[in-house]
Amino acid sequence: MKKLLLALFIASHISLMAQKEKEDPKVEPIPKPQSFVTTHKGVFGGKTLTYKATAKETYLKNEKGDSIASIWSVAYTQDVMVNSAQRPVTFIFNGGPGSASVWLHMGLFGPKIVKVDSDAKKDDGAAPYDLKTNENGLLDLTDMVFIDPVGTGYSRVVGKGKEKDFWGLKEDASSVAQFIRLWITENKRWFSPKYIAGESYGTTRAAAVGKALEGNGQNMALNGLILISQALDYDGSTSIHNNITSYVTYLPSMAATAWYHKKAGQGKNLEDFIEECRKFTYDVYTPALYRGSLLTDSEKNSIAEKMSYFIGLDKDYILRSDLRILMHRFQKQLLADKGLSIGRLDGRFMGDEADKLSENPHLGDASSYQISSAYTAALNHYYASSLHIEMDRPYLTSNSKIGSKWRWRTVPEGSYWEPAPVNVSRSLGETMRRNTDMKVLVASGYYDLITPFFDAEYTFARNGIVKERVTMTYYEAGHMMYVHEPDLIKLSKDIRNFLTTE
């Protein structure tokens, strides 16, 4: 009997220990945060400037004081600062979600940038690549802090942290806002003008972080947002069946891309052709989509003929598509006569695929796979040779695990209903109305087939956004318009003007 009781006691103890281990798994020791500081000199805006580069890990803590995540950042700050209260600081990140800040770091804002083929005539393939001084850099105007959200770059969960604490719309914004407050406090920059620059999902994050910075007992007001390839209302950037908004917002970008490939609008300049398409989209196409099957055959034929004129696809194909062209089909159809598909991030890029009849580009996005290796190599080379960074793990320029685990919902678990899809544009409008000094720059590429320029116009015309404090700029390139050198120069000038104009 005693043996039985002892066995039951041991079994119960093991079960309790196993349950405790499941609820409170073993926590790995938290390593000491890494930091690498170097000093450099460069010419920015015609001024010779000595600046400090600080590449480091910053630990985020929970309410109990436990370290839960490590955020990797690279900060470029003026070495001798006369008046920090007058010196702006700009926080910069990319999107994804799941992308590190490598693209804006090595493509637009950093002191060194990688040169890729400016006109999308060929891919950059394998090494060697060209790392050059950023002659259009902005360090004369602002300090810059490049942020890699948790799970990207060298940033990671540590201690008692869990991925779900960071991989979600609200969770991500909260962690980035916490990092910004920590950086500002550590560097004594509460009086400095503060800006955020984001690209793609990074613009979603920028609007969400702007709102998050208003709370938590440490209200921080931003001076401005720089939104590159904005994605605030996902209705307008999600090309799927039955989403009428997306048929509307994508059509002018299809027209611009068809013009670029000489499939439409020949004999007209790009801006005039786009304006013509804008009017057709608002006045004819949008009402037709809402009328649906109430359209007569004659009306459908007339609209299909006009759409063919704008986007370069065969009229019969447009009719068979019921006047609704999904973006992935447009990518495959526009240059089908040449056996080529076009890029999504940038419609100028072309891919030669073995399967000429697939419904969508089966190799992936030509405008991504043709430059990604160059950016990855450039960042790793620059980190090692210029910033003297030595880390014990690879730098993740992107992390595919994050997207599949991302929590897009903003309501608590168990809530029955949440309007979809994601839309942070009204939050931006409310933030602008509370912070009457905050201004916004919106940069859009004509050939961006992910976040179309017409969607930016559609979004910023609504949602309570204060249009008098919004500057819209346009570029003859795609999602990452800075890969096109003339637009790198133009975008840098536009940001320079934005930072210096009251």
Image (cartoon, rainbow, N blue to C red):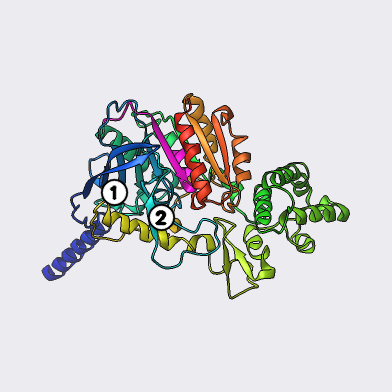
Q: Is residue 194 above or below residue 93?
A: above
**What count of labels does the image hold?**
2
Crowd band around label 1 with a 10 angstrom C-alpha radius: few (<14), some (14–19), many (20+): many
- Please state the horizontal and vertical placement of residue 452, each as a whole percent of the image: 60, 48
Asked if the stretch drawn in magenta spans residue 288, the answer is no
Residue 411 visible to an observer of this rendering: no
Asked if the stretch drawn in magenta spans residue 204, the answer is yes
Q: In front: mark 2 or mark 1?
A: 2
Q: Is residue 83 left or right of residue 94?
A: left
Residue toward you, 350 or 200: 350
Q: Are marks 2 and 1 in contact (CB under 8 Å)?
A: no
Farthest-out residue, left: 2
Q: Earlier in the sequence, mark 2 or mark 1?
A: 1
Image point 52% across, 40% down: which residue? 424
Real-space CA distance between mark 2 and mark 1, rounded to the nearest whole angstrom: 30 Å
**Quarter of the rendering containing residue 77:** top left
Circle 2 SS class: strand
- State the mark number for residue 249: none
Residue 138 visible to an observer of this rendering: yes
- Quadrant of the snapshot with the N terminus: bottom left
> Magenta residues?
188-208
Residue toward you, 427 or 191: 191
- Please state the horizontal and vertical placement of residue 328, each as a whole percent of the image: 62, 61
- State the mark number for residue 114: 2
Residue type marked 2: Val
Farthest-out residue, bottom: 354
- Please state the horizontal and vertical placement of residue 243, each as a whole percent of the image: 65, 51
Circle 1 SS class: strand
Q: Is residue 215 above or below residue 146?
A: above
- State the mark number for residue 69: 1
Image point 48% across, 27% down: which residue? 501
